[in-house]
Image (cartoon, grey):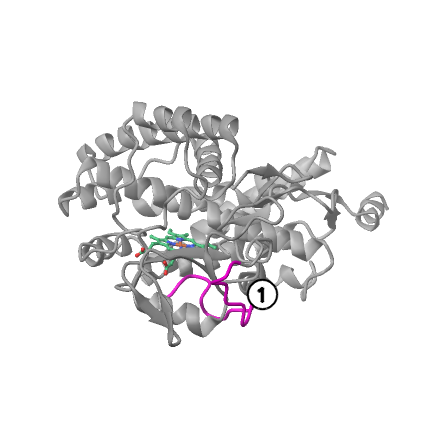
Amino acid sequence: MTPGPSATGTLTPPAQTRCPYMVVRNPDDVREILKRPADFSPANALVAVTPLTGPALRALQRVRFALPPVLASNDTDTHAGIRKVVAGYFTPAKVAAMEPRIRELAREAAFKAAQQLDRAEPVDLVQSVAAFTPAIVMLELLGLPVRDLVSLKRWGLDSMELFWGWPDETRQLELARSAAEFYVWIRDLVTESVRAPGRNLFKSLAEHGLSVSEICSLGYFLLIAGQETTTQLISTTLFRLLDGNAVQSWRDAGSEAGARSMVRHVLATESSVPTWRRVTSQDTDLGGEPVPAGTEILLELSGNSITGSFEAGPGARTANSMTNGLVFGFGIHRCLGAKLAELEATIVVHETASVLPGIQLRDSEPAWIRLLSFQAPRAVPVKYSVLDTNSQQA
Ligand code: HEM
């Protein structure tokens, strides 16, 4: 497939690209596939959508970048034990105990945004309220140092585009350099963490018997999946509340129940992870129809603009585009951060709408991140609404 930047500068599959995946939209089929990991393996979860070319590959090889299967793409029987170690850091009790901290961070960020607006400075809610709280919370839960957050956010977005986007050769090289930098940062952090006092995820994984390369692979996935996806969910929720097309109004989101209900609505209709992949590990069948070994499958988990933008391939199944209860996956690989993501998104949206009641969009058509499995507005620029400015002056 040839890559092609869209008019808004985001990367999307070029028009009329024949879909290289068997697209599965029917929720019953999606659930069935996720229930049968022996037939429908997650081994392709982290495979680059656009095959990496020479210069990009060399940039990665130079730092010995490798993503051996450990968690999301692990279809062997080591998965369960590793998952248990990671799950220990996100138990319901640990997530619930983080609530006051999440609220503190969210409120602080919203107040800072209000101060910027008071000084008539430009405010982008993605940067000011959505970006950093999930990253800080994740690092604190994992027992890792909270540092280099600006780089962490950039690396996460670059790696998402490298592995789930359609970058051309020049862009691939830029993204691969960023991914290599990120990987080196993770390896240094792993070396430091296994020797650090106290408990942290990397140390627990080393004690479980994982090699440095396996811990780096898990870290690379988790330090992106564990925060950028939540940032993107928050960004879409804030944008939809402000663009006037939401079931809830901005005012409704000022109550916790209103914010929660809007977050759930966005998860169902345009989640930050709208699709996920599987590949058949052997000849099998789905709903009585044969599916040959090696078939790459794209599962629709939520509304999105990607599955519809491909020209339907011969294997496409298009029974139903709305999916319920599958946004965080299903079965043995179901997302370990589902509760945390929903809690964070609800609190950030609630605090932002409470602290900034009188705002409106400054740009109602921002560029969007549109990757195979990730979507969100890149920016949510806001200003005080005219009404609110008048009431402040009165
Ligand atoms: C809105 C935010 C998020 C969404 C929509 C999301 C969605 C997903 C999806 C669709 C999967 C694949 C599930 C499958 O293959 O069945 C997944 C896996 C995973 N997610 Fe999330 N996720 C989010 C946030 C998080 C957070 C905050 C964390 C951790 C703090 C996290 C950790 C994981 C892990 C560890 C896996 C792999 C689990 C395994 O393979 O056993 N995610 N997520």
- Residue hosting label 1: 265
Residue lying at 20% horizontally and 45% vertically, measured from the top left? 205
Disc 1 secondary structure class: helix
Q: Would you say the magenta stretch is mainly helix, strand or loop?
A: loop
Judge whether residue 143 can be spotted in this image. no
- Residue 380 place in picture, x, y as percent: 65, 44
Q: Above or below — where is 267 with respect to 357?
A: below
Q: Nearer the viewer, residue 299 or 149?
A: 299
Residue type at mark 1 is His
**Mark 1 nearby-residue class (10 Å; few <14, some 14–19, many ≥20):** some
Q: What percent of the width, then of the height, locates residue 161?
A: 49, 39
> As drawn, is 246 to the left or to the right of 86?
right
> In the rendering, at what x and y percent does residue 287 appear?
40, 76
Kindly identify the residue that appears in the image at 48 percent across and 57 percent down: 275
Residue 358 seen by the camera? yes
Can you tell which quarter of the image residue 63 is in? top left
Horizontal arrangement in the rendering, residue 101 relative to residue 194 (left or right): right
Q: Residue at x 68, y 43 (%)?
A: 366
Residue stretch in magenta: 313-330
In the rendered image of this protein, does residue 166 appear above or below residue 334?
Answer: above
Task: Choose between 141 and 34: the one closer to the eye.
Answer: 34
Magenta span has 325? yes
- In reply to whether residue 351 is colored magenta, the answer given is no
Residue 126 vertical position relative to residue 338 in the rendered view, above or below: above
Percent across and percent down for residue 1 are 51, 42
Ligand 1's quadrant: bottom left
At 18% across and 33% down in the image, what residue appears?
A: 195
